Amino acid sequence: MKAPKITIITVNYNGKEILKKFLESVEKLIYPKDLLDVVVVDNNSSDGSVSYIKKIAPSVKVIKSKKNLGFGGGNNMGIKAAKGDFLLLVNNDTVIDPDCLLSFNDCYRRWSAVEKIGAISAKLVLIDKYIPITLRNAFLHDYVYSKRRDYGVNKAPYIIKRHTGERDQERVYLPVSYRTEGQLDFELTVKNPGELGGMVSVGKKYSSKINYLKHENFKKINFRLSNKETEECLLDLVQNAGSYVFRDGYGRDRGSLIVGGNQYYEEDIGQYDKEEKISAFCGAGVFVNKKALNEVGGFDETFFMYYEDDDLSFRFRKAGWEIVYCPKARIRHIHAASSKEWSQSFIYNVERSRLLFVGKHWPTLLVVWEWAKYIFKDTIAVPVGHLFFMEYRVFLGKLRLRLKVNLSVAPHILRSLMRSSRLSYADIKSLY
C-alpha cells in the first residue's frame, strides 16, 4: 500500500508555552515530508501564539478563528482545510513519538484489509517518566534532583496512600523529564509517622531502611541510580489506551486507576500492548480516515469541550466504521493543560457535555432519568450538603455552577428528545 497523505491538526488556545515541544516532535516525525502537512487552528489566543508559531515553524499552516470555538469547532476548521486522506488529530500539549505515523499507517493497512476502519486511537502516556517508590512507615514530604534537567513537566508526584494492617504505606511516582537518561541522583525528605523505623524502596530492587532518631520528624535519604539502574527503574503511566463509556453516559480512560475515590494512572507494564477494537477513541491523539468523516460529518459543535470524541466514536460505529487501538503509536501527553483538571471550567464542561451526550444518544426514558438524577443529586443535594457545615460560599458556588449547566443543556436536551435515532436498551446494557 502506498503511503497516504496525512494532515496533522491541532487546536491551540493560549498554548504558547507548550507549543515548542509539540512542534519539535512534529518536525522529528519519520514520514515523507511531501506527504505530510501540519495545520494549527488558533482559537483566538491572546498570548502571542500565532506570531510564535510563524516564527519557529514557518511551514505550519495557521488558521485563526475570530472566537474560541472549543475543541470540536476548532478541529472542524482544521478538517475543512486538510489536504490529507488521513488526519492525525492531536492535542497541542503532546509530544509525538518519531515513528508514530508509521505505526498508524501499518495498523490501518492490516486492519482495513478485513474491516471498515474509521479511526485508530493512540497509546497516550503522561508526558513525564516516573520513578516508582514504595514507603512503609514513612510519608513523602519533598524531593529534589541534583540536576535541573531531570525535573518533569508536572512537578507534583502521584501518591497513592494505603493502610495495610499496622503499617501505613505510600506508593509514590516521582515525575522525571522524559528526556532523562544516564545516572540519576535525587534526595527524598520523608516524614516520620511516629514509628521507630521504616523502609523506602525504589523500583523493584533498591531499598533502604529508615532509622528515625528519637523525636526526629523528618529524614533525608539520598539515592544514586547508575545508567543501568535508571533505565530499569523509570516507567510510563498510561493516560489513555482507548476510552470506556458507561451506562450512565460517563466516560473514562482505559488506563486510569481509581483508588479511594481519586484517579491515578496505571503503570505501563504491557497490559495495553494488544491491538484491538474499542468502543471509543480519545481525541487527544487519533488517526482518522477522511472517508469516514465525509460520511458521518465532523465533530458536533454543541459540545464545546469533552465528550465530542465519544459522540463521534458512536456515530462512526453506528455507520459501520470500526475503531482500533494501536499500542505502538505512542504519544506523550501533559493532559488537561488548557482546561486545568478540576477547575470550575473543567467541571462545567465535563458535566454539561455528559448530559448532552446522553441526551443525544440514550433512549428517551433514560435521558429523562439521567437528567433528573443530575438535578436532584448534583444540583440540589450536593450543594445543600455544604450548608450543614456552614460552608455558604461553597454552597453558592456549586449551586450556581450546576444551575448554569442545567440552563445550558435544557434547550438541547428538549430538542433532542424528538430524535428517533437512538441507542436501544440492549445497546446501553452492552456498555460498561
Image (cartoon, rainbow, N blue to C red):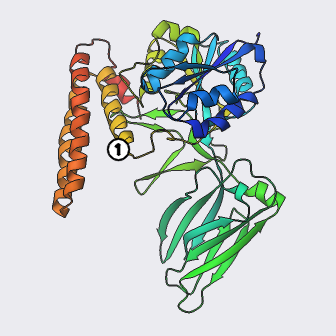
Q: Quadrant of residue 249?
A: top left
Left or right: residue 367 versus residue 190 is left
Using the rendered image of the protein, determine whether residue 276 is visible from the camera's viewpoint.
no
Q: Position of residue 291 (x, y in %)?
A: 56, 8
**Identity of the residue drawn at 48% across and 16% down:** 316
Above or below, comparing residue 361 to residue 150 in the picture: above
Above or below, comparing residue 135 to residue 149 in the picture: below
Q: Position of residue 325 (x, y in %)?
A: 60, 28
Secondary structure beneath label 1: helix
Left or right: residue 340 versus residue 89 is left
Q: Which residue is mark 1?
A: 344
Q: Quadrant of residue 228?
A: bottom right
Q: Position of residue 314 (x, y in %)?
A: 44, 21
Q: Residues within 10 Å of mark 1 (few under 14, many from 20)?
A: some
Q: Quadrant of residue 308?
A: top left
Nearest the camera: 380 or 156? 156
Left or right: residue 28 versus residue 157 is right
Left or right: residue 1 versus residue 77 is right
- Name of the residue lying farthest toward the bottom: 214
**Identity of the residue drawn at 32% across and 17% down:** 422
**Identity of the residue drawn at 77% across and 68% down:** 224
Q: Position of residue 230 (x, y in %)?
A: 77, 58
Nearest the camera: 352 or 273? 352
**Identity of the residue drawn at 24% across and 35% down:** 404
Q: How many marks?
A: 1
Above or below, comparing residue 426 to residue 46 in the picture: above
Using the rendered image of the protein, determine whether residue 102 is visible from the camera's viewpoint.
yes
Nearest the camera: 276 or 384? 384
The N terminus, quarter of image: top right
Identify the amino acid type marked 1.
Answer: Gln
The C terminus, quarter of image: top left
